[in-house]
Amino acid sequence: MFKIVDKKVLNPTVTRIDVYAPFVAKKAQAGQFVIIRATEDGERIPLTVADYDREKGTVAVIFQIVGATTYTLNQLEVGDYVADFVGPLGNATHTEGLKKVAVVGGGVGCAIAYPVAKKLHEQGCEVHSIVGFRCKDLVILEDEFKAVSDKYVLMSDDGTAGTKGLVTDALKNLIESGEQYDEVIAIGPVIMMKFVCRLTKEYGIKTIVSMNPVMIDGTGMCGGCRLTVGGETKFACVDGPEFDGHLVDFDEAMKRGASYKEWERHKYEETCNLFKKEVK
Amino acid sequence: MPNMSLKKNPMPHQPADVRNKNFEEVALGYTPEQAVDEAERCLNCKNKPCMNGCPVMVHIPEFIAKIKEKDFEGAYQVISQSSSLPAVCGRVCPQESQCEKYCIRGIKGEPVAIGRLERFVADYHNANCKEKAVKPQSNGIKVAVIGSGPSGLTCAGDLARKGYEVTVFEAFHLAGGVLVYGIPEFRLPKTIVQKEIDTLKELGVKIETNMVIGKVLSIEELVKEYDFKAVFIGSGAGLPKFMNIPGENLNGVFSANEFLTRINLMKAYKDDATTPIKHGKKVVVVGGGNVAMDAARCAKRLGGDVHIVYRRTLDELPARKEEVEHAMEEGIIFDLLTNPVQINGDENGWAKSCTCVKMELGEPDASGRRRPVVIAGSEFEIEADVVIMALGTSPNPLIKSTTAGLEVNKHGGIITDENGETSVEYVYAGGDAVTGAATVILAMGAGKTAAKAIDEKLSK
């Protein structure tokens, strides 16, 4: 059992929880993930490490309420416990030697992109953060990003926050204006990562993406998280979660990501109704 | 007078057309009368050939003699001197290639049903004995066991009985390893596994779940920072193999590991489960081992029309004969001398069929089995919305990659000496992590050997 020591609602659908998990906190690095079971009999879901405090022994994860499990997780409050919290799993982001990087975040993916930007900033790298959201209400981590970025570009689909448009538009502008990046790190919806990679390929800029597929164990055992990278099958949990974006088969990843969509929708409604009944 | 019947007492079972729709245990176990009658078939041979077939050397004629006397608890005490998981072994051991293979009664007729008797005795004990195991006097020496499958549990149990302070580290949220994530409920009820684990806890064994050794802690840290004097690696063979054929990443294609873990560990077959599983209408299971049988029988219970596709013939099928018979009785269709070459998908990325080829057997290969050869022009399609790859597994490289000096062979199996000690002093290994995917009882034998060696080394 792992105690929730802090909880922040970042926007109506995105929540941050800080969990007391000293073993995980001791080793966690940007880019790695944990597997959580919110409750006994709950599903195992992977969530990327958003932050950690080695002294306090806490690890933060940020999640979007998209299904039954994240809905249940969001019902837990400070002082409650999550049943299981395993990690850190996967490989840390490679940041060695990078001098100038564009970090591109989309939606809740910004929660994963932020610790990467922070790590780069702390090692003296010039960081340009380009973040995109659907609308103003969904913007998260604005101050945090600004604090670790030499340039911060906010984009929104409807123009209610920052500039109207896509993160790819902003990235293209920066590249066209002469910015030269050692690397682009893109973390967000698969479709966003796909188009960022299509753009950077034109300019020949190495691009790293963080994949977040369905997983069970997170240690290489089930193969549920497999994806095709450069024509080879890889497991996101042990070979990733970060990969060379120019080699990832995003279309396949999108289809695989949708495999439990119907089931999830049904389960989500069921869970919401259950909680509503309890409230009455 | 011994019972000279040439046949074993048959095992009562759930009828095939009932059990293929539920996840309750298939075999129902002997009654005391059946057990005594079967025990009477044992001739109590002086040289005990059956014992030599047992990797943990259970004193077989002795426990059977106790059954004859109707001293069932006494029989249990005999078994438990050698085996820490009798209720498990009685169910999943391949007795036909071990103890029962050497039974004198098997020369003319069927051997004594040693496995069924072991199961009877263990179930009797679990149902009737309320006494708890007693934690022995501690010797204060800490030993770490990585993995809570059959080898780890056996090693932990043997060391705890000798007074060691044993901690078992398990990566999942639940202890039991392959006994809980791999072997289905209908073959090995999880309450039985839990009971065996509870017994270990009573002996003082600590079980730490959610501990992925190699990630959360390294072996070096266990030794240097946490003062474990010896470490046993029983991390199993967790990595699934795929065929690397086109279409293998389509939705609806699973490793047997994923399919079985969703069903067995995460209970996805239950209506109120939080973890989903695709209920295939037309299911193809590729492979011929026990895991393939388990996956096929699970898929059948989820309502599927299930085919096992295997590239050799029934004679080469590596699964236990009993499992194959059960699968056939339950309505699973065997497409033998058949091999998939491609999985075909629909526009949404879901599997819809398997393209297969017919095979014929050629010259024997390195394993001594005749090598299957493709018959040219024999392609055909089988409808399949779920395809399960049960092709075997290999050891997980997580520990090897984080332990300096730990040597492995070309298949990834950890190299040990005959006592189970690895290339790193005080670090032992056993079970599938050493041999690659094998059986529960062989893993237990390895755990036992290592426990003995660890005790000898640490008590010097």
Image (cartoon, coloured by chain):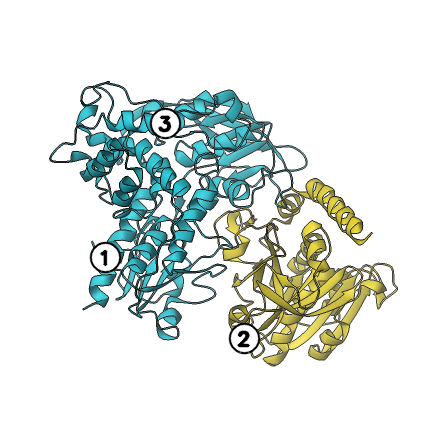
Q: Which sits in the foreground, B206 or A190?
A: B206
- Determine the residue positioned at 49% across, 31% down: B296
Q: Nearer the viewer, residue B337 or B149?
A: B149
Foreground tag (1 vs 2): 1
Of badges 1 and 3, the one in the foreground is: 1
Q: Position of residue B419 (x, y in %)?
A: 21, 56
Q: Quadrant of the N terminus of chain B?
A: top left
- Residue B434: x and y in percent read 31, 51
* Residue A112, image x, y percentages: 65, 65
Read off the residue under disc 2: A97
Q: 10 Å neighbourhood of mark 3: few (<14), some, or many (≥20)?
A: few
Q: Which is more N-terminal, label 3 or label 1?
A: 3
Query: Who's the residue at 27% across and 57% down the image?
Result: B451
**Residue type of the residue flagged with mark 3:** Glu
Check disc 3 and report the residue beneath it: B322
In three-dimensional space, the C-alpha distance between marks 1 and 2, rounded to whole angstroms, equals 50 Å
Q: Are marks 3 and 2 in contact (CB under 8 Å)?
A: no
* Rendered location of residue B288, percent (x, y): 40, 31
**In yellow, which chain?**
A
Q: Cα distance, mark 1 to mark 3?
A: 33 Å
Q: How many marks?
A: 3
